[in-house]
Amino acid sequence: MMEPQDNIEEDDAAASASPPPRSLPRQRVSLQKSSVCSRSYFMVVMVFFHVYIINVIALLLYVHYNNGSNAITANRDFTSRDNNHKVTGPPDPQTPADSGFPRNMYLPRIEGIRVGHVQKVSLVPGKVHEMKTLSLKPLLFEIPEFLSEEECGVVVRLAQLKGLMESQVMVPEGQEELNQQLNLSPEEIFNFLDLNQDGQLQPHEILTHSRVRDGIWLTSENLKEIYDGLKVDQDGNGLLNLEEFKRLKSDAFQRFLLQRGVERSQLVRNSRHTWLYQGQGAHQVLQDLRKRVTSLTRLPSSLVELSEPLQVVRYEQGGHYHAHHDSGPVYPETACTHTRLAANTTSPFQTSCRYITVLFYLNNVEEGGETTFPVADNRTYEEASLIQNDVDLLDTRKHCDKGNLRVKPIKGTAVFWYNYLSDGRGWVGEQDEYSLHGGCVVTRGTKWVANNWINVDPDYQRQARYQQFVSQQQEQEELISELNSDQHIERHQDL
């Protein structure tokens, strides 16, 4: 009973013997101040943190609802998208809108993934099509059984009933007047033709220009014949310097060709064609085909509906179409044919502005008639390298087998490709030079094809004005139709 007491006394003695801790009160005071400062700092940080979070949430809500309203506006012209259909996304929402019409419409581009990649696409109810990537430059796809045998037959019969015309006149006229209108000097034309700027016009530089201008497929042998006939190549080296070129009139080739005579096989294009309307009131097969193209390309229906009618082409044995681009590059001084009236421009330079080409094979060709893409998936593209020595990659009568890619015509199959690149903001960019293509010569049988071209002006404002212009015209026509209908009813009631 005494041990605890003794222990206490010993502890008290030890406590009295040791000096009192002087730092203890200071430590407590210091601890209290630190706690208060920490708590205050924590409260300030939390306030700022909550304000920051609120601002972030507000910003996200603003962006969400703003994008949502834009998406609703843009999607009015779009068809529903298949989940398995690989399509690039919309443009960057931070892209500033051009003055005039805001950018509430964009052009989706289907991803090729890689050559040989197959995508499942739903184009008609109850059926799934397979779409195969044939090349990435240009972005080119193939869809077997796009049309049924019956549909192919209907399109061919409708074209025959409509009647076909020559796809190209023998020798176009008016080059002299066009040059006078442009007011180009011989020096300016020479520099334009001199692709490598070496001061001399080589055969391939002359041939490339004359084929586009005159529509005649000249060879190096033909060119030498013309030089000799016009006595323009004085030194006989096959090259033209500026002084020799000045001796030529702009229509000298045309005059020579008319005098000598031109055969159909010498034309850039040897075929017959017609156009079939696909709008309201057209044959149901034609309307269905246009709807299918809209679903395939995932483009706004308004763009497809305002594009060119369906072109149907027949190539007889020996028929061909030398390699070409469906649409040319668009510069500030160039006008698109389909928006020219709405743009109110008088530019002499026009191009078709065909953003997408959809080509349908309507029959099986016995032999030949492939669609060639001479430079598909090349690493580089140089116009001068298309004609080298005895090989002319543009010549589909002689050198179709030299091209990188050939598509065999199979009845019901469709192929489509982009003629332009993207501008990175969901609209049309520069021309895709790799989209060069042609129709190989039909060596046996007949070839029937059809084309749907989707016209889009690379200038967004011009395209928007054109669509508004057409919409206003349609509204006026509908109003006039309603007024006439009302007047007819009133007269009927009076009677």
Image (tube, rainbow, N blue to C red):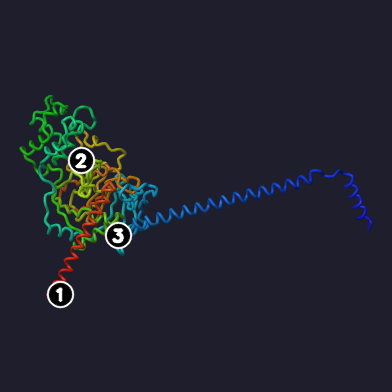
Position of residue 476 measured from the top left corner of the image (x, y, whole percent): 21, 60
Disc 1 vs disc 2: which is toward the camera?
A: 1
Position of residue 442 measured from the top left corner of the image (x, y, whole percent): 16, 48
Q: Quadrant of the C terminus?
A: bottom left
Q: Quadrant of the N terminus?
A: bottom right
Tell me the SS state at disc 2. Answer: loop
Is 426 above or below relative to 207?
below
Q: Which residue is mark 1?
A: 493
Q: Which residue is mark 2?
A: 394
Q: Residue farthest to the left?
A: 259
Q: Which residue is mark 3?
A: 123
Q: Amino acid at mark 3?
A: Leu
Q: Who comes first in sequence, dot 2 or dot 3?
A: 3
The reply to whether residue 325 is in sight is: no
Is 108 above or below relative to 266?
below
Q: Amino acid at mark 1?
A: Gln
In the image, is 343 to the left or to the right of 69?
Answer: left
Q: Residue farthest to the right?
A: 2
Disc 2 vs disc 3: which is toward the camera?
A: 3
